[in-house]
Amino acid sequence: MIEILFQALLVTPFLWILFLGLLFFTKLPVPERYLSEGVKYFSFFMALVGLALWAATFAEAPRFLLLDYEDWITVGEYRFKTRFIVDLLGATYAFLTCALIGIIFKFSRNYLHREEGYFRFVFLLSILLFGLIIVSFARSLDLLFAGWELVGTTSVLLISYFYTQNQPVRHALKAIVTYRICDMGLLAASAWAHHFLHSTDFYLIPALVREQHHGAQLGVRFIGIFIVWASLAKAGQLPMSSWLPTAMEGPTPSSAIFYGALSVHLGPFLLLRFYDFLSQFPGLLVLIGAIGFASAAYASLVGRTRSDAKTMLAYATITQVGIIYLEIALGFTSFALFHMVAHASFRTYQFLRSSSLIQDFFENPTVEQDVRIDRPSPFGKYLTAEAKERLFIHALHGFHLDYFTGLLIRAVSAPANLYIRWEKYSMEVDRKFLKRILGRGRL
Amino acid sequence: MTLPGAFVDVLPLGVTFGSAIFSNFYSRENRRQSYAIGLLGGLFVYFTYIFFTRDFNTSLAVHSFFDIRYNKISVFVAALFCGSLFLGLYPSRRTVTLSESFLFYIAGGLGIILSNNLPTFFLFWLFQRCLPAVTIVRDAVTNSTYGGATYLKQHLMALTCFVLLLYFASLRGLLVTPMTEMPVTFFTWPVLLLAFIIIYQSHGLFPFHSWVHDMVGSFAWYETASVFLSRAGVLLFVQFLLPTLKTDPSSFKILILSLSILSSVYWSFRGLSEETPVRATTYFYVAQSSLLLTGLQADAVAVKGSYLHMMVISISGAGLFSILDYIKHSFGLERASRHLGLAQYYPKLSTLFCLFGFCMIGVPLGASFVVEDLVITGILDYQPLLGLGHIFATCLNGILFFLIYSRLFLGKNPFKDVVVNKDMPLGQMLPYLIGLVLLILIGILPYLFLEKLTW
């Protein structure tokens, strides 16, 4: 039963994407009404199957289902195994995905009505759904990476949804640079797991480390570091935080689903998937906790200096995800999962309401009574006025995170730039030499 | 002199050379254009057919000095060579005017691919590389433009190395020996060094890569592509160096492995700092093809990944250049703006461009996701730290592609004209779609294709 539900959850979005792709290239005119009707049935079916799967795995928990399908790639002794794990963690995330994407589809029906890119929006969100289902149930790092990349790619394309303006495109570029830098971590973790443990199976890795005393090896520790590194970009944790608030350029429904709900929680999800492995290295847990704490403090301070709703929500999201990191580091994994689900649901609601915030504000009876909404900091009383002012200025500048990142990028690319200058000079010398030999009047 | 029963095998080369010469006397452009594209399509069908049906024992040694052989790798590369050029040229056949020398480029490329010993390879290599050199010298003399100086310098260096290599081979009596049958004892340090320079120079790899800048600026994309698609460096590596690589000093292997990764990183950086879309796309393409050699040097898994990679970048690259060329001719790319916002004019072509790029940079459901998995696994098994270098290079390539895409197709429209749809009709873009479907099929069902890539 569980396997059939899982297969339905995996195959349906894939077929749906193929169908949409075919519609796009064959130029078949699909009126918006029919498309949104189709989307409605599709998302309802997905949410229903997701719920059924979640209920079934909840009833079976803590037992879980391991599924082995045919190898995807076979070359010599190398096998890319198509393996899935259907457990409560994956089923919860998958159900959350199906339910929230269903809500977003419903919301977009009105929000993006007669919008030119509605079809594109539906198509990209469907790919996101497929990617997230893969991530939820993947049992190996290779397979997880496939879903992870799909999520990243759709995220970038949706940030540049309003592609006729320059600003969203620039921010999409910033997002892809951050994603790619951290995706290197996931790719490196997968490759190093192949190399040192000869397996990328989440289910086997902790046992391999425990039984074969691989834990003593530096390479195995690096797998953990790479995983933590990979989780940072999507979760918007330090030092990869600055892209998230700028990613709000896409349509509000996509901001809600990516940066309020699903994509941003993939970082904690990855850590939860690997918790059995990570927990064997206390140093890594300290690192996760420190990153979470620092990110929460940073985003909380910077968020207070922002004046637009979506940016404030973005910083609030980073703060909450930071706290989830801290919970994972402290070993409260079930609580972290609960926190993730609750936060994703609530934040989606907030993002979706942010478009009508002004209307909500004026409809609020407290406005008539001239009651100011003031949020004094609990630590404010310990700081002098001058220190507060300095803190405010630094927070307003995002603690110069972009400046330091720019410095780092310049330092990394300095040798390449130097070489490029030398090469241009050398080519100029060649040209002068050729001119001397073949110049007019010489032949 | 031996003439095998399958004399028909010499026909592709003969017909291409014959028609190249003939077309220069009988030069009606439309007819030459249709003929060249038709010839490429026919050759593609022919090589694909024999790739799947032949037992690959055919050899056409017209003379011991001139040796042409059909083995599986050469037929594979030949099919890719013709197929990719056909895919790129067919959709834009009405907007592009092929140069008189293009058929010679094809003939030279085919000769390089099918040659079996060093003198034959040298002959065709020299012939193909002389074609741009002639244009460069002519331009310098008549127009006082000296843009190809570095091309001439670096090819002169490679030519000297090749002559020295032939001299070393003749000293040992191995001049006409098939490349794959060279004895291990031949590969002394000087020979390895000479081979390294020729291979890296032919493939446009660091530190002998600067000639690529000259090619990009001055020649049509299909001419540059035919130089790259003949894969002279890769073939020389696979047929000449690879059989003995296991016995080569490991320091040499690590040197060439790390240089090809460095080369990819360099081209990516170069592309990131480049404003011109055509140049940036070429740098992206060369950065990708630099990674071909890294896989070939690692282990059996990575080698298979590299062959698949060759297929992916040939098809995708031709698609990218062809789309760019079509836009350049139908609209123009020379505008003073960082973003061109062309997706408004070409919604479907921009999608195709994006998908071809995604198929190259390792996005799942595209063929290069499989490639990356195989190559990185293979390299890591051989040298973990270089594997990380490869991952870094792949990451940079991805960023570069999105930068190119965003500059070309996204952003505010800087043109004052009314936005109209200028896409190709569906029938015209059919070769792109077929190529794309193939790349996605490889990405979804890789085992169907990987089984065939065994030799």
Image (spheres, coloured by chain):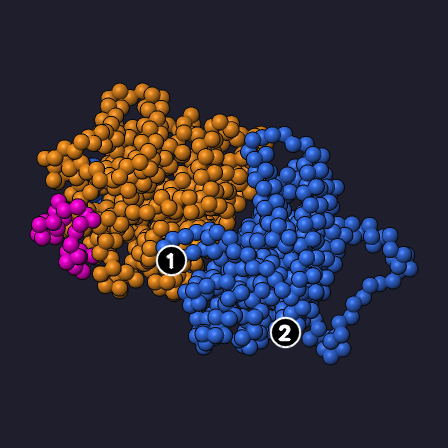
Residue A187 image label: none
Q: Secondary structure at mark 1?
A: loop
Q: Which chain is represented by orange in the image?
A: B
Left or right placement of residue A52 versus residue B212 in this view: right
**Residue B254 in sight here:** yes
Subunit ID for the residue under disc 2: A
Left or right placement of residue B148 versus residue A63 in this view: left
**Residue A412 in sight here:** no
Residue B181 among those drawn in magenta: yes
Mark 1 in CB contact with mark 2 (< 8 angstroms): no
Q: Quarter of the image for the C terminus of chain A: give it.
A: top left
Q: Residue at x 26, y 64 (%)?
A: B250
Residue that mark 2 sits on? A331
Q: Comparing marks 1 and 2, which lies closer to the viewer? A: 1
Residue that mark 1 sits on? A77
The quarter holding residue A332 reads bottom right
Q: Position of residue A167 (x, y in %)?
A: 60, 49
Q: Residue at x 82, y 63 (%)?
A: A373
Q: Residue at x 63, y 54 (%)?
A: A2
